[in-house]
Image (tube, rainbow, N blue to C red):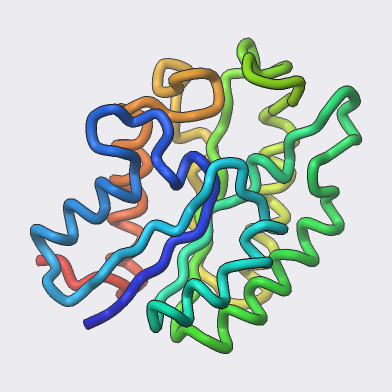
Amino acid sequence: MSTICIFGDSTAWGAWDKEKGGWVNRLWLFLADKDYYTELYNLSISGGTTETIMNRFEAEAKAREAEVLIFQTGGNDASYEHTPDNYLVPPEKFQANLEEIIRRAQKISRQVLFIGFKNVDESRTKPVSWQDVYYTNQNISRYNEIMKTVCAESGIPFLEVFGALTNEDLEDGVHPNARGHEKIFERVKTFLNENGVTKTR
């Protein structure tokens, strides 16, 4: 039996997929039907960043004896308040956090993978409707590139999902709707098979 733990933010948690509970839950449903050798735990929380993940993932992964760790993060790190350079997690800190997460993760699991953050609908994210926070595609793309570089330097598989969704795939400008989550799930499913994580038939 292989155990996978996924750590992320509200997108990985499943907001706003009212049909099947998000791309991670869609993956769980798929594996439950096709792969009897994998257990999947969604340990994502709304508002998650590399900071919150770094503070908690080791204990939660060890408690489940995780063999595979998957991280989807970056969107909240790249968001800002008031001015474009007032990042929630500055780029230099974001990079350092990623490097530290990878260093710790490789000590407790046999395989580590990262999934980038998707694009947003800027007509609804400058700022978002629920708080004075801004999300821009330029910033998200910049943070995705940082993640991609860190993963390449560490030999970590990275899945790009930026640009995979249209504005019609987004519920509120940031979070995917059911169709958006389905698109991410399909990419993740292929990604995991290509990297030997799952044993689907």
Of the pair 110 and 195, the residue shown nearer to us: 110
Residue located at (17% from left, 76% from top): 37
Relative height, residue 150 to residue 116 (above, below): below
Of the pair 44 and 161, the residue shown nearer to us: 44
Figure disc tally: 0
Relative height, residue 14 to residue 3 (above, below): above
Of the pair 79 and 47, the residue shown nearer to us: 47
Q: Is residue 49 left or right of residue 46?
A: right
Is residue 169 visible in this depiction of the protein?
yes
Quadrant of residue 92 within the rendered picture = bottom right
Quadrant of residue 198 within the rendered picture = bottom left
Q: What quarter of the picture does the N terminus occupy?
A: bottom left
In the current view of this chain or complex, which residue is farthest to the top?
123
Relative height, residue 152 to residue 44 (above, below): below
Q: Is residue 191 left or right of residue 144?
A: left
Q: Position of residue 125 (x, y in %)?
A: 65, 19
Relative height, residue 145 to residue 55 (above, below): above
Q: What quarter of the picture does the C terminus occupy?
A: bottom left
Residue located at (73% from left, 32% from top): 138
Residue located at (90% from left, 25% from top): 83
Q: Position of residue 109 (x, y in %)?
A: 47, 83
Q: Position of residue 172 (x, y in %)?
A: 51, 18
Q: Position of residue 161 (x, y in %)?
A: 48, 43
Residue located at (34% from left, 44% from top): 23
Is residue 158 visible in this depiction of the protein?
no
